[in-house]
Image (cartoon, rainbow, N blue to C red):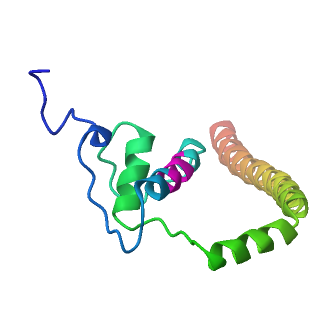
């Protein structure tokens, strides 16, 4: 490993410094970073300028920078209880319905634009016909 520079060294292999008042253990740090990695893998945007190639490293850097909000203890238990009561299926159905509504709107917009283009082409064609008809009349005279 004679080619070790900060640019190609993975942060996981370096000693990690973190605020032990906010994150009490390396285990908690790993859990938070793994959950954030999952979000990044599903397409979430990074919250810090991307410095690493791997999403797990980006998630770890975000966690260390304090960009990831998390709850522990009684607050976490309350959040879990609220999440269990939440109807995710209804939320997904509402999202799907909103997408359907948008697609209907898009269809209406496409129809409107097509009709408008057709009428504009018709007026342009009429203007050209009038112009050529006038020229034909001038040639006949």
Spot occupied by residue 134 in the image (x, y as percentages of width and height): 68, 47
Look at 32% across and 55% down and name the residue there: 49
Q: Is residue 15 magenta?
A: no
Spot occupied by residue 88 in the image (x, y as percentages of width and height): 84, 61
Residue 137 as seen in the image, left or right of residue 23: right
Give the dominant element type of the magenta stretch: helix, strand or loop: helix
**Residue 83 seen:** yes
Spot occupied by residue 14 in the image (x, y as percentages of width and height): 23, 43
Viewer-proximal residue among 117 and 36: 36
Q: Quadrant of residue 109?
A: bottom right
Q: Is residue 35 magenta?
A: yes
Look at 84% across and 51% down and name the residue there: 107
Residue 35 as seen in the image, left or right of residue 112: left
Viewer-proximal residue among 39 and 134: 39
On-image quarter of the N terminus: top left
In the rendered image, the vertical position of residue 112 relative to residue 56, given as above or below: below
Viewer-proximal residue among 46 and 59: 59
Outermost residue on the top side: it is 1
On-image quarter of the C terminus: top right
Look at 54% across and 69% down and name the residue there: 70
Residue 28 as seen in the image, left or right of residue 100: left
Spot occupied by residue 72 in the image (x, y as percentages of width and height): 57, 71
Residue 46 as seen in the image, left or right of residue 137: left
Q: Tell me which segment is drawn in magenta.
A: 31-37
Q: Quadrant of residue 8?
A: top left
**Residue 86 seen:** no
């Amino acid at each position: 490993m004679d080619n070790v520079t900060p640019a190609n060294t993975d942060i996981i292999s370096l000693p990690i410094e973190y605020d032990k008042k906010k994150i009490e253990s390396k285990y908690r740090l790993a859990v938070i970073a793994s959950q954030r990695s999952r979000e990044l893998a599903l397409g979430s945007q990074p919250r810090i300028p991307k410095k690493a190639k791997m999403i797990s490293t980006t998630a770890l850097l975000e966690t260390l920078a304090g960009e990831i909000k998390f709850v522990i203890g009684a607050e976490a238990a309350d959040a879990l209880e609220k999440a269990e009561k939440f109807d995710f299926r209804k939320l997904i159905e509402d999202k799907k319905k909103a997408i359907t509504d948008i697609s209907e709107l898009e269809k209406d917009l496409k129809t409107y634009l097509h009709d408008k283009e057709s009428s504009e082409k018709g007026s342009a064609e009429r203007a050209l016909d009038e112009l050529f008809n006038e020229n034909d009349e001038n040639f006949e005279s």
